[in-house]
């Protein structure tokens, strides 16, 4: 998705912006550009492809100045091409703009502007913004960029994050946020300030940040940040201090971020649990959820909304909340929720799960829930993200920055968060199950179980060597591990581009079984749990149709070795927590298969880390 970086201060803006953009590479993009004000004129450099191309162009034709904006683009309107890359410049060269989002009414605005004599240089929707700003600036008696931007932006439909620079007022950048097209963070420095769509872009420069809320705009100079609503009312923003460090965002000894993130899950899960569980008194504290006993007793239903991997995490969480807190749970796709007039009232708690906290579909589902009066919770990894801020209460994943596009450690962290949520709900509602104390203790075992599972990576890597040439896979699971089958298949397809289907195992006979033959390996999660016998029978049905069967099985289960062709063993784990363990060999398998196939593991084609368009 698109990324934005801006700088105003006393240093040279170019290297700061390029460094910031390089930290957004993980989001995925197809072109990049930068504009700085140099000797009173806008200097623009843009190029398609990786940032290295833009760097090369800057080396050939350098630009420097103390104020500038940069952008990485993920094409929505207009092909990835230099003339479509941001920043976009106005007719007179007075204004320049970078933008995340989609101008829904750009066709009509473009026609209007064309009728006024504006000549468009790109096929983008963004370009209308910069021409509108110039139009309003020329209309106005006072040459004020903030005012011109405000007037232009009120013409736009859709959700946007926009930064404007002008040679009229060369000391300032104007940043605007409307809706959920990604965040706008303003980093506070010493005699300098920064703007970014994502925290990692400017984290090396400062940890003190202001986040624009919906329909707010900021005028940012080297020494001041003035925040207003789009209606012109002054706002006193809160300043957040971001705790992440850059070291934890670096790849370290690993070849890929995804690999690093898989192998740090013992640590990340420790961080997820840390400080929240009182093992002595068997209680879970989640102060940021802001849930009183009275409010907890009023809730009669939880509706989880999420997308992709976070959605599968929600499917696991349903088992926790229903079993431990005896509350009904529905799990919905964020992208579908608002299209079916969902039944929600003030006794419904809507739980949004989102690693980035900026997924536009999940945010839209949250908005729908808010409008209908639900209690709103979020589970997020990105601190300060929109999903965290708009909820009545939140639980952070504490997984640290997740850079690989394929989500791994955020998936397990969000499952653990929901486990803690279920225990906390049970406490607050006064409905502890007889095994409640044991369930609390079980959480403490997780980091060790995760570590022991990850130690078996060599075996998974060997198996990847045998499987990487297949082009279709079927993943099966049952009970609490059926969402893990879905997640395992998603991991494989998104990074290795192999077609993989995940299914609840009992559904195999209702259709997918027709696909099975010796060319379609079947991966079965068959742990020693309440559905073990059922899974064995699925394995037998697949074997009878000549499938190569790979089983994820519990240590000590020698019987399964006589049924499956390959077995990946995991340590025995309490059934409710087994998804956290069962997913690990599937993450590793997807990773090693993708590496074998020479795929771009951290930035798979067509995907982006933070999906801020519908
Ligand atoms: O940031 P979110 O958790 O809201 O992201 C949701 C999905 O876009 C994300 O999980 C996606 O499916 C990942 N690529 C999965 O690895």
Image: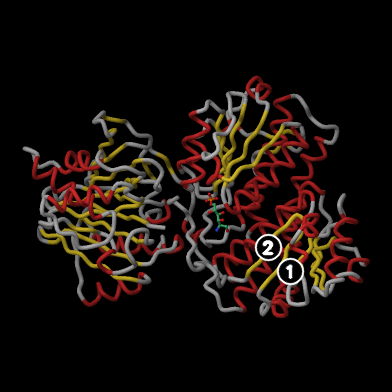
Furthest residue toward top:
294
Mark 1 lies on residue: 515
Q: Is residue 570 left or right of residue 291?
A: right
Question: Residue shown at 70%/61% (left/top)?
Answer: 584
Q: Earlier in the sequence, mark 2 or mark 1?
A: 2
Residue 39 rendering spot, x and y as whole percentages: 10, 61
Mark 2 lies on residue: 501
Q: Is residue 173 above or below residue 81?
A: above
Within 10 Å of disc 1 (Cα), the crowding (few <14, some 14-19, many 20+) is some
Furthest residue toward left:
141
**Which quadrant of the view contains residue 571?**
bottom right
Q: Nearer the viewer, residue 417 or 238?
A: 417
Residue 169 rendering spot, x and y as whole percentages: 13, 47
Do the residues bearing badges 2 and 1 touch, measured as CB atoms within 8 Å? yes
**Which quadrant of the view contains residue 432?**
top right
Residue 154 rendering spot, x and y as whole percentages: 25, 38
Q: Nearer the viewer, residue 501 or 282?
A: 501
Q: Nearer the viewer, residue 342 or 176?
A: 342
Q: Is residue 335 above or below residue 266?
A: above
* Quadrant of the picture in which ligand 1 is shown: bottom right
Q: Is residue 38 left or right of residue 329?
A: left
| Residue 221 disc label | none
Question: Residue shown at 27%/61% (left/top)?
Answer: 123
Number of callouts in the render? Answer: 2
Question: Residue shown at 27%/69% (left/top)?
Answer: 82
Mark 1 C-beta to ligand 1 under 8 Å: no
């Amino acid at each position: 998705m698109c990324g934005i970086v801006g700088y105003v201060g006393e240093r040279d803006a170019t290297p700061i912006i390029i460094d910031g953009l390089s930290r957004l590479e993980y989001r995925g993009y197809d072109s990049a550009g930068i504009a700085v004000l140099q000797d009173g004129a806008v200097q623009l450099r843009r190029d398609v492809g990786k940032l290295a191309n833009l760097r090369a162009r800057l080396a050939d034709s350098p630009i420097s100045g103390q104020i500038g904006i940069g952008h990485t683009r993920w094409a929505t309107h207009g092909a990835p091409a230099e003339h479509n890359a941001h920043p976009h410049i106005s007719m007179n060269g007075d204004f320049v703009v970078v933008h995340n989002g989609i101008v829904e009414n750009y066709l009509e605005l473009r026609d209007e502007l064309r009728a006024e004599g504006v000549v468009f240089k790109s096929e983008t929707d963004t370009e209308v913004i910069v021409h509108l700003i110039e139009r309003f600036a020329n209309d106005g008696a006072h040459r004020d960029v903030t005012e011109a931007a405000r007037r232009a932006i009120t013409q736009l439909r859709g959700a946007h994050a926009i930064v404007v620079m002008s040679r009229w007022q060369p000391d300032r950048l104007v940043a605007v946020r409307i809706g959920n097209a990604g965040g706008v963070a303003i980093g506070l420095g010493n005699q300098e300030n920064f703007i970014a769509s994502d925290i990692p872009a400017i984290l090396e420069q400062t940890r003190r940040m202001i986040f624009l809320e919906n329909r707010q705009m900021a005028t940012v100079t080297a020494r001041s940040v003035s925040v207003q609503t789009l209606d012109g009312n002054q706002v006193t923003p809160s300043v957040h201090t971001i705790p992440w460090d850059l070291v934890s965002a670096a790849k370290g000894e690993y070849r890929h971020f995804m690999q690093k993130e898989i192998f740090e899950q013992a640590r990340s899960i420790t961080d997820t649990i840390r400080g929240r569980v009182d093992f002595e008194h068997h209680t879970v504290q989640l102060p940021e959820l802001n849930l009183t006993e009275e409010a907890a007793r009023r809730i009669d239903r939880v509706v989880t909304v999420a997308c992709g991997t976070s959605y599968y995490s929600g499917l696991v969480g349903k088992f926790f909340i229903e079993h431990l807190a005896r509350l009904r749970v529905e799990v919905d796709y964020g992208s579908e929720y608002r299209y079916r007039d969902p039944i929600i009232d003030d006794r419904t708690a809507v739980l949004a799960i989102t690693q980035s906290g900026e997924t536009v579909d999940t945010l839209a589902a949250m908005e729908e829930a808010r409008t209908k009066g639900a209690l709103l919770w979020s589970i997020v990894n990105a601190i300060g993200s929109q999903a965290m801020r708009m909820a009545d209460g939140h639980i952070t994943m504490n997984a640290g920055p997740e850079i690989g596009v394929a989500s791994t450690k955020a998936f397990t962290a969000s499952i653990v968060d929901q486990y803690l949520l279920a225990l906390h709900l049970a406490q607050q509602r006064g409905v502890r199950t007889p095994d409640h104390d044991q369930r609390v203790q079980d959480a403490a075992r997780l980091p060790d179980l995760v570590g022991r599972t990850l130690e078996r990576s060599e075996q998974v890597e060997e198996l990847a060597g045998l499987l990487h040439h297949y082009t279709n896979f079927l993943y099966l699971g049952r009970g609490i591990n059926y969402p893990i089958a879905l997640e395992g298949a998603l991991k494989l397809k998104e990074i290795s581009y192999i077609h993989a289907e995940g299914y609840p195992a009992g559904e195999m006979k209702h259709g997918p079984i027709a696909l099975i033959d010796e060319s379609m390996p079947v991966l079965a999660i068959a742990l020693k749990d309440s559905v073990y016998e059922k899974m064995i029978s699925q394995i037998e049905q697949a074997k009878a149709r000549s499938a190569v069967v790979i089983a994820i099985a519990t240590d000590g289960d020698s019987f399964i070795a006589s049924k499956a062709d390959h077995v990946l063993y995991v340590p025995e784990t309490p059934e409710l927590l087994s998804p956290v363990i069962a997913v690990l060999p599937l993450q590793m398998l997807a990773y090693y298969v993708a590496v074998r196939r020479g795929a771009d593991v951290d930035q798979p084609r067509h995907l982006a880390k933070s999906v801020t368009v519908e």
